[in-house]
Amino acid sequence: MPNPTSQVQSRQLPFGGDDKFYLPAAQANDTFVNNEMIALNPATGLGMHCDDSTASIQFFGLFADPTRQVLANDPPPVLLPCRRPRLFTMPLASGTVNRGANPIGTPVYAKDSGHVQFGVTGLTNSIKVGYYFDVAGASPEVGTNCTSIWISAEPIN
């Protein structure tokens, strides 16, 4: 499943303030969209899309700016503004087991940087985003029957 190319339909409940964290990113041609999940690669210390394509990355937060194009010739440092909310919503990937079949506290994994799923079936790297907290309702994505869930973020190690 490719990463999103437009704003991810997500809501956030912050810890208290509206602080942004700035995570350095690789100087490479890439596009980041508002509310997509961002991961930290501990091996490089760089931020990247939180999807199933890279091993050993950790969920960091949600991209906190409008769509941003990063170019390979951008002057360093390239910084990704992120928010790390206490709770956030994210659409379930299509084909994901129904949210009602999973108890609160079930681990949730990144399918791509704009969708999550319960369990690791079909995933290569199993990037845990957090834990299922509550139902958020129907996702406004056009043409899908996805639903969204509230997620309690995975702690950063």
Image (cartoon, rainbow, N blue to C red):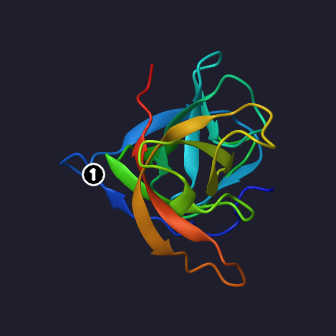
Left or right: residue 50 versus residue 90 is: right
* Residue 136 screen position, x and y as percent: 42, 68
* Residue 123 screen position, x and y as percent: 78, 39
Foreground of the two, 14 or 67? 14
* Residue 151 screen position, x and y as percent: 43, 50
Q: Which residue is mark 1?
A: 14
Count of numbered circles on the image:
1
Residue at screen point 46% across, 74% down: 137
Residue at the farthest top position:
43
Disc 1 crowd, CA 10 A, few/some/many (<14, 14-19, 20+) = some
Q: Is residue 59 visible?
A: yes
Residue at screen point 27% across, 51% down: 14
Looking at the rendered structure, the kind of residue marked 1 is Pro
Residue at screen point 61% across, 63% down: 98
Residue at screen point 57% across, 55% down: 36
Q: Quadrant of the N terminus?
A: bottom right
